[in-house]
């Protein structure tokens, strides 16, 4: 089944997922927008209670999707968790986005829900973060920039999120002021600079 160009209309309940707000796209609308077999992420534009938005649908399993609504949209139409939202949404064909570089993808994958949370950001936010990482001129600077992007994604997810490295799990407190990935050969508590190379241990500053 190929995706349909016809706008999809439905009413859904606004939900809160970590620090983000979304509605579940019904199965029929999901199939029409994403096709069958479904694409992983689908760029769309439309209206929520008449207010324009542009974003990407995020998979939620079983061929169905979530539609995230940012604070600008929610404030404009005065909606909160539990409110019903009238959605009209259409698929937008666009050139493929810049792929995630391997180091950033690995770091996001180590954060519980990190890849999905990054994908749920607006196109402008994702593009800006990728450009930030690519500005690095040295490997050590790039590693720090990747860490900062992951920390920002973790902040947007909210709460304590497990980070997995080689099967081990570290829990970063929500009130941590700095997250630094350090070399596995040196215990994080004794690492001299706290700004060395990835990818195995996590040191946390200001976490209480």
Image: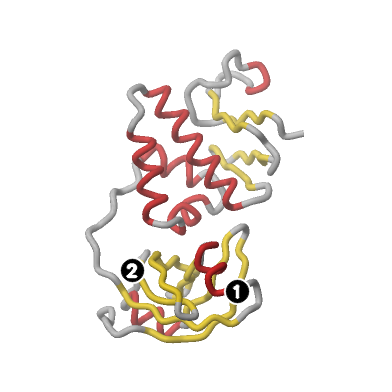
Instruction: State how far apart marks 1 and 2 are (Cα).
Output: 29 Å
Q: Mark 2: which secondary structure?
A: loop
Rendered-image quadrant of the C terminus: top right
For image coordinates 55% across by 69% down, the residue present is 74
Q: Secondary structure at mark 1?
A: loop
Q: Which residue is mark 1?
A: 79
Q: Residue at x 41, y 72 (%)?
A: 52
Q: Position of residue 164 (x, y in %)?
A: 57, 42
**Residue farthest along the top direction in this orientation:** 192
How many marks on residues? 2
Q: Dot 2, how many residues are within 10 Å of its Cα: few (below 14), some (14-19), or many (20+)?
A: some
State the quadrant of the N terminus.
bottom left
Q: Furthest-front residue in view? A: 76
65 sits to left or right of 113: left
Q: Colour scheme in the image?
A: secondary structure
Q: Residues within 10 Å of mark 1 (few under 14, many from 20)?
A: some
Indicate the position of residue 190 as horizontal and vertical percent values.
66, 16
Look at discs 1 and 2 and give the one toward the viewer: 1
Q: Which label is found at residue 39?
A: 2
Residue lying furthest right? 208
Circle nearer the N terminus (1, 2): 2
Q: Quick one: 102 or 97, which is closer to the camera?
A: 97
In x, y percent, where is residue 125? 42, 50
- For residue 126, which numbered disc appears in the image? none
Does residue 146 sit above or below 155 in this rendering?
Answer: above
Q: Nearer the viewer, residue 177 or 103?
A: 177
Vertical order, 122 against 25 (above or below): above
């Amino acid at each position: 089944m190929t995706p349909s160009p016809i706008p999809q209309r439905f009413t859904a309940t606004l939900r809160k997922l970590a620090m983000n707000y979304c509605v579940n796209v019904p199965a029929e609308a999901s199939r029409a927008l994403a096709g069958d077999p479904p694409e992983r992420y689908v760029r769309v534009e439309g209206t929520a209670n008449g207010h324009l938005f542009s974003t990407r649908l995020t998979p939620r399993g079983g061929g169905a999707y979530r539609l995230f609504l940012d604070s600008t949209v929610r404030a404009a139409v005065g909606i909160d968790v539990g409110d019903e939202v009238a959605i009209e949404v259409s698929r937008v064909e666009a050139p493929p986005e810049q792929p995630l570089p391997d180091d950033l993808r690995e770091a996001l994958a180590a954060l519980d829900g990190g890849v999905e949370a990054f994908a749920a950001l607006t196109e402008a936010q994702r593009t800006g973060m990728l450009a930030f990482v690519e500005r690095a001129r040295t490997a050590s600077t790039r590693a720090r920039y990747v860490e900062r992007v992951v920390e920002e994604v973790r902040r947007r997810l909210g709460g304590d999120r497990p980070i997995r490295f080689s099967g081990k799990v570290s829990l970063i407190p929500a009130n941590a002021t700095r997250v630094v990935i350090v070399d596995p050969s040196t215990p994080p508590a004794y690492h001299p600079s706290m700004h060395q190379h990835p990818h195995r241990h996590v040191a946390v500053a200001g976490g209480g």
